[in-house]
Amino acid sequence: MLLIIFFLVGVQDSKAETAYVASLTAPDTSDFPHLTTYLDVHDPEGGFVHGLTPQDVTLLENNLQIPASELQERQPGVQFVMAITPGDSFSINDTLGVSRYEYLRQGLLEGTWVNQQSGVDDFSLLTMGGPQNTHSSDPNALRSSLETYLPDDTRTISSLEVLASALQVVSDPTSRPGMERMILFITPPQGSETSLGLQSIIANARQQNIRIYVWMVGSQDVFDLPETELLRNLAQQTQGTFFAFSHDEPVPDLESLLEPLRSIYYLGYDSQITSAGEQQLAAQVTVGNEQITTESKSFDVNLLAPAPTLINTPEEIIRTFENQPTPGTTGIDANLVPTEQMINILVRFPDGYDRPLARTILYVDGVLYSENTSSPYDQFMWDLQPYTQDSVHTLRVEAIDSLGITGNSEETTVRIIVPTTTQGMMVVFSQKRPLLAGLVILISASILILVLILGGRIRPKPHPGQVKPSVDPNAKTRPISYQARVHQRKDSVTQPVKITPLPPHPSTTRSKSWRERLPWLKPKQVPAPAIAYLIPLMGTGETTLPEPFRIISDETTLGRDSLKANIVIADPSIENLHARIHHEGTSFLITDADTVAGTWVNYKPVPPMGIQLEHADIIHLGQVVFRFTLAEPGQLREIVITPLEADQ
């Protein structure tokens, strides 16, 4: 039954021999997404098809048509293995006493292949006695091995042992990329019991694009037997040729087999694969009016998402006022520096397939801050000017490669530290000194004039509306005559009357002082002195400095309900009674009122028994953050900086 199957397959392949034949090797994925492979195209006579262009080849990657980006004809040579399995038919002598094998060997040695220069092909010779020569680049080494080899007549059982060994040797890595692999199998007729072994060898050879040429040595009586068809089918299934030798047939020149296999096409294209796993690749080749499609080759691509990483990112950024005063000077620049921070990233490809990037994105506190759509993709500039209060931020980057695969980095926490409000006001005053001096002088002068007016030292001129105009402003003034003046002196009505002044009477009403006439100058009630402060830390969305809370008593409560708390904090994350601060001597103890959000000091939760506060400690109540400062700070606590985890 197996002989019938091989016979039918052989008939079908004999028809295929009249057509063009093309084969493709498994692609090299080391430069993914640019893949390279080797394409072999032969005409119906077995000759190599020269002169193809990239326009003649279309790749079928998972049934998706992709044009070839490069196609180069190369001549890397052939990795050739001659496998000789002796048999009874080898030792049959003619009337001259010369065996069939000796005639075959003589024909082989007379070929032109022995005259080829060294370094073109790779030669090996395997026999039943073991390797006679392996991987030699000198054809004369193979010639010498053939001249000295004598078949072992004692081992005449048909076997595929030598052919199987030849299949392993020819599968060794080639000395040059793209070299074709070829086996010349010299054998007597094989029995039907080898049919299963031949089927396995055919499958292995087809998978690796290994051509097997079969030279059968025997009498002409066996040329047409079904057993011979097994060997003929072996050659046809592996794109080789079959030659039967009895005695009189001319021995083919080995060069005629090697020369068409020395050329091959180096093919490159840009892959469109976007997922990992097994892939399929075939090629459509157009030669004149003929179109050939190669068998599909399977290959694996282990694609992984790009892995971006933030590098050299500082754990904290300290902003200071630019140009601090030097000894002997008082000038300060109110600008905070640094104003920006360079963010550098590194993008790795864990799958080993380096490929171009299409975009990188920087996220600050979970919000898209900046993106790069062109080179350089590994740098971002972070503007620090909006951050005028102490704050903590998270940074994350995202990388998208040319295949559209997205990868994200771990979150990195950065703390920004800025000067206190008092320092900022001092800088502003120093910077605006001339303007402030003029303003003080103007205000002082205005107050002095007001005081003089209220004290009666200065009498303003009456307003023109308060002066009674004359009856006839156009009337002329006539001079008084002498008679009129005499009449005025003698007239008792117009004479001055002497009035005796009344004795002074003590006044019951005290006149107001100038201080009393200016109520805003009255002394104000002095509030109780603060022993400590809770300074709210401004968030990134706030634009004004919050007022600090004064701690003036030994027992201070904090919460949202004014009936339960001395310091009322209107925030949804604060409970009605959230925490207590107890003052005794020089110590301050803060305790949590068993709240859900808890109370935190320096990013650590407050235990049930409370924790001692020190100057400049950071307190978290829900989502509200304070800095605890003493009115008279002593020795500061040693600061220990601990990077925040990504999920905090």
Image: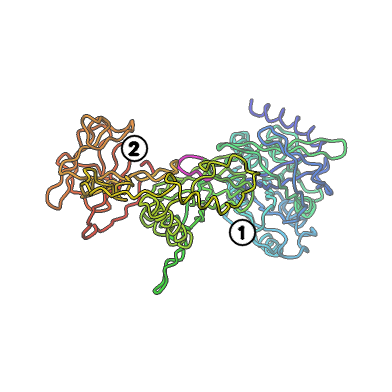
Q: Residue 98 at x, y = what percent? A: 74, 55
The residue type indicated by label 2 comes to: Gln
Residue 507 shows which numbered tag? Answer: none
Q: Count the marks.
A: 2
On screen, residue 68 above or below 143: above
Q: Is tag 1's residue or tag 2's residue first in the polypeptide sequence?
A: 1
Residue depicted at 22% across the width and 29% down the height = 563
Describe the element under mark 2 as helix, strand or loop.
Answer: loop
Residue 10 shows up from this direction? yes
Q: Residue 159 at x, y = what percent? A: 59, 43
Front residue of 185/278: it is: 278
Residue 134 shows which numbered tag? Answer: 1
Task: State which mark lies toward you, 1 or 2.
Answer: 2
Residue 316 shows up from this direction? no
Front residue of 268/159: it is: 268
On screen, residue 461 above or below 136: above
Residue depicted at 79% across the width and 58% down the height = 111
Q: Residue 519 at x, y = what percent? A: 32, 45
Q: Identify residue for label 2.
A: 623
* Left or right of residue 111, residue 541 in this image: left
The residue type indicated by label 1 comes to: Thr
Q: CB of mark 1 within 8 Å of CB of mark 2?
A: no
> Where is the N terminus found, in terms of image quarters?
top right
Front residue of 403/189: it is: 403
Query: In the rendered structure, which segment of residues is drawn in magenta?
Result: 362-367
